[in-house]
Amino acid sequence: MPDLAARARTLTDLHTAPEILVLANVWDVVSARVVAATDGVRALATASHSIAATFGYEDGENIPLDLHLDMVGRIVAAVELPVSMDMEAGYGDPGETARRAIERGVVGGNLEDRMQPLDDAVAAVEAVLRAGRDAGIDFVLNARTDVFVQAPRDADRGRLVDEAIRRGRAFLDAGAPVVFVPGVVAREEIVALADALGPRRLTVISVPRYSLPARELEELGVARVSTGPFTQRVALTALQDATAEIVAGGVLPESTRTLN
C-alpha cells in the first residue's frame, strides 16, 4: 500500500499551488496509465459516469458500489500518482464509502450534494472528512454542489450563483478544501464564485465548445479543472471516427500511437 498520507499531502498541495490542477478523468487501468504517462500530469481523478458506462450501467449510482470500488482500486494500483475518486453522492453512506475508497488507496474524492437540505449536505461532508482523519490522512474532498446542473433552463443565473456561494461556503466551513460547481462556464459567474469562495477554492469542469481554456481559469483563481465523462467521449469519438473510415474503405489514422 502506498504512503497515503504523503499522497494526500501532494494532492492538497496541487490544489493550493499557484498553477491550476488539470485532471483528465480516467475510467479503467489503460486510460489511467495513458493519462499518468502524459507530460505535466500530476494526479488522477476517476469519472463515475465513465466507469459506470464501461460496465453498461447508467450514471447515478446504478453501478454496484463493490464493482465501482474494484475498478478504482485497480486504477490506484496501476499508477504512482495520487488518485481522487468520484464517489457520486456517497451511495447512501458517504463516510463509509469514503472509508472503503481510502482502503483502496484513494486520497481524495468528489461528493455530490444533489441539492439535499444544506444541513444534510454539510453532515455528509463532515462524515467523509472524518473518515479521512480516522485513516490518518487529510482527505482532499472536492465538495460538489449541484445548484447549476439541477436548475431549470430559465432559472435566474444570479440567484444560482448566490446559492452556490452559500452552499460552497458551508462546505468550506465544514472543512472541505475545495468546492466543485459543475455547470458553470461563463467568465462572470466563475469570477463571482472564485471571489466569494476565495483563491484556489473553486473547481470546475471543462465542457467542449463552452469552457474557458485552463490557462484562463488559472488567471481567475480556479484551483482545479477536470473533464468528467468528456475524456471518455473523446476516446469513443476517435474510435467511432476510425471505425467509420475503415468500414468505408479507408485505413486507420497514421497518427495512431502504441499506448498499450
Image: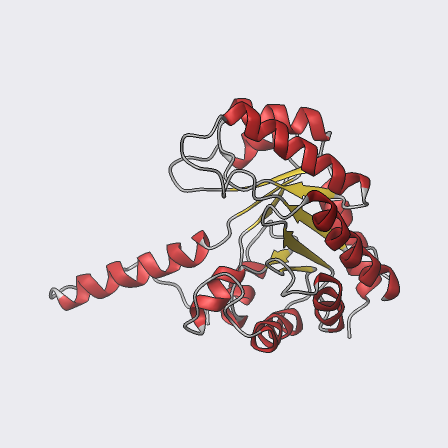
Task: State the colouring used for the structure image.
Answer: secondary structure
The N terminus: image quadrant: bottom right
Q: Measured from the top left, where is residue 236 in percent x and y?
A: 35, 61
Q: What residue is drawn where x is 81% and y is 61%? A: 132
Q: Quadrant of residue 36?
A: bottom right
Decide if residue 201 is on the left or right side of residue 203.
right
Can residue 252 be seen in the rendering of this structure?
no
Residue 91's place in the image compared with 42, above or below, is below
Q: Quadrant of residue 215?
A: top right
Relative depth, front residue between 11 and 258: 11
Q: Quadrant of residue 3?
A: bottom right
Q: What residue is drawn where x is 11% and y is 66%? A: 249
Relative depth, front residue between 23 and 161: 161
Q: Measured from the top left, where is residue 42 in percent x and y?
A: 65, 53
Can residue 6 be seen in the rendering of this structure?
yes
| Numbered label tally | 0
Q: Measured from the top left, where is residue 245 in percent x and y?
A: 18, 61
Q: Measured from the top left, where is residue 121 in percent x and y?
A: 70, 49
Q: What residue is drawn where x is 55% and y is 75%? A: 64
Relative depth, front residue between 152 and 70: 152
Decide if residue 250 is on the left or right side of residue 195.
left
Residue 7's place in the image compared with 121, above or below, is below
Residue 111's place in the image compared with 164, above or below, is below
Which residue is most to the left? 249
Decide if residue 209 is on the left or right side of residue 188.
left
